[in-house]
Every structure is written in C-alpha cells, then in structure tokens.
Amino acid sequence: MKRALVIGNSDGIGLEVTRALLRQDYEVFGISKRAAPIVHDRYEHVVQDVTEPAYRDLLTGIVARHPDLDVCIYCAGIGGRFDLDNLSRDVRVFQVNLMAAVVTTELVLGHMVRRDAGHFIGLSSIADGLTSAEAPSYCASKAGLSHYWEGLGLALASRKVKLTNVRFGFVDTKMARAPVRPFMMSTERAAAVILDAIARPRLRVTRPLATAILARILALATRIKLAMS
C-alpha cells in the first residue's frame, strides 16, 4: 500500500488532496493546526502547529515509523491583509510559508534522498515572481520556496527521488481574499493537478497558465516602476 503525508490539510487544497489520495487507496497521514473533517480507516491525523518545536519531533517520528513513505505534500500556508502598523504577522507568514517548509524538506525529503525513493511536493505560488505592496511577506516567502525547491530539484536530477514545486494562482479557499481573483480554480481542480504531478513527476507545475502570464505582466510593470523611482 502506498503512503502519503499531507501537511496543512484541515481545509482547502490539503483537505481535497487528502480525500483524493484516499480514493486512490493511499494510506494517508495528515498534520495541521486544526482537526480535519475526515474519518477513514486508512487515515491518521495529528493536530500540530508547524511553527512549534514539537513539529520537528513529530516529523522525525513519522519518518521513523514509516520509512517507506511514498509521497509528502506540503500544503500549509498563510497570507492575509498586510498591516504596516503590525509587522509581527509577517514573521508568522515566513515561519509557516517558508521556515516550516524548509524543516519539512530537511526531515522528509532528506530521508527520501538517503533511500533514493519518494516524491516530495510543495505548494508555492504564482505570486513568487511578484513584488507586492499589498502582500510583501506572502510573495517573498513564496519566492524563497520556489527558488529553494527548484534548486534542490535540479540537484536531484540524476536521482530516483522526485521533487515538484506546484505554483497555483487563485484557488477557492479561505486565503483567496483579494477583491479581484482572475481565473480562480476550485480546490477539486487543484487536487487533480497535484495528483497528475504524482502520476507524471516534473520539477515545476504552474496552473492556471493564464494567471502566470498576468503575473509576469504585473511583475514587469513593477520592475519598471522601481527602476523609475
């Protein structure tokens, strides 16, 4: 039986991909800050904040008990309205979106590298190419993730272990709070993209492409603005 670990799956994309994996007969282990609304004989859930020290111990224990883990999907991420008068929230954005993802990469992908088997999938964002006054910490944390994961993926090119960086645009979750959300995807569609990446591993997956094109245009406009400032 194949085994998958999904981090950040109490709702949104993580929850939907967990359900999809169970339909494909995976045994799934879930970790999130809150309980997940899933009851299944092949599902085990642990409530754990990824920014707390206990998260490292939890991952270490899961890898030790299940060294043949086939897939790990890091879905945890936060955003929210930027508040220039309260930059403390930005610290947490980096802790969840970037540093906890790096810890997960160290412990889970590191184990996969040692056994030269497995597939690590991380959810970044098409926003990784933007410099944003509205969400500076979100865009910057996702940029760090994309560069890190894709650099690792290039380093793994000759190995059997796989790494995939999934870059979504707007997905219909609680994080999609922008007043304008062009080409927004459903969580079901996002989960289908992730399952396709499992079936056909590649380093970068970007969906929808129309949002990626729009993001490039916005990034270019920002670079011109910065150059003229």
Image: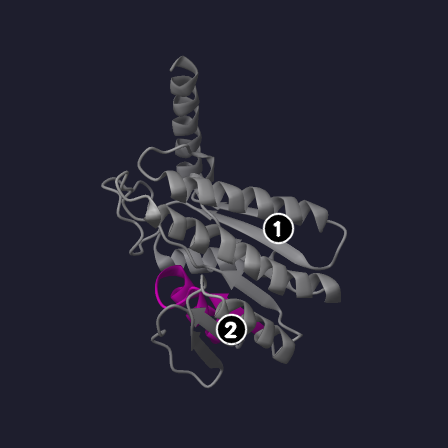
The answer to which image quadrant residue 114 occupies is bottom right
Residue under the image location 69 percent in, 59 percent down: 161
Q: In this rendered view, identify the residue nearer to me: 121 or 206.
A: 121
- Magenta highlight range: 3-24
Residue 24: horizontal and vertical position, in percent? Answer: 51, 73
Residue 113: horizontal and vertical position, in percent? Answer: 71, 61
Residue under the image location 45 percent in, 53 percent down: 95
Distance Cα–Cα, label 2 vs label 1: 20 Å
The amino acid marked with disc number 2 is Gln
Q: In this figure, which residue is indicated by the disc labeled 1?
A: 202
Report crowding for label 1: few under 14, some 14 to 19, many 20 or more residues within 10 A (C-alpha). Answer: some
| Mark toward the viewer: 2 or 1 | 1
Residue 77: horizontal and vertical position, in percent? Answer: 41, 55
Residue 123 seen: no
The amino acid marked with disc number 1 is Arg
Residue 58: horizontal and vertical position, in percent? Answer: 53, 73
Residue at the extreme left: 179
Q: Determine whether the residue tagged by mark 1 lies in a helix, strand or loop.
A: loop
Residue 182 seen: yes
Magenta-span inclusion, residue 12: yes
Q: Is residue 185 above or below residue 18?
A: above
The scheme the figure's colours follow is one colour
Q: In this figure, which residue is indicated by the disc labeled 2?
A: 24
Residue at the extreme right: 158
Q: Determine whether the residue tagged by mark 2 lies in a helix, strand or loop.
A: loop
Residue at the extreme bottom: 41
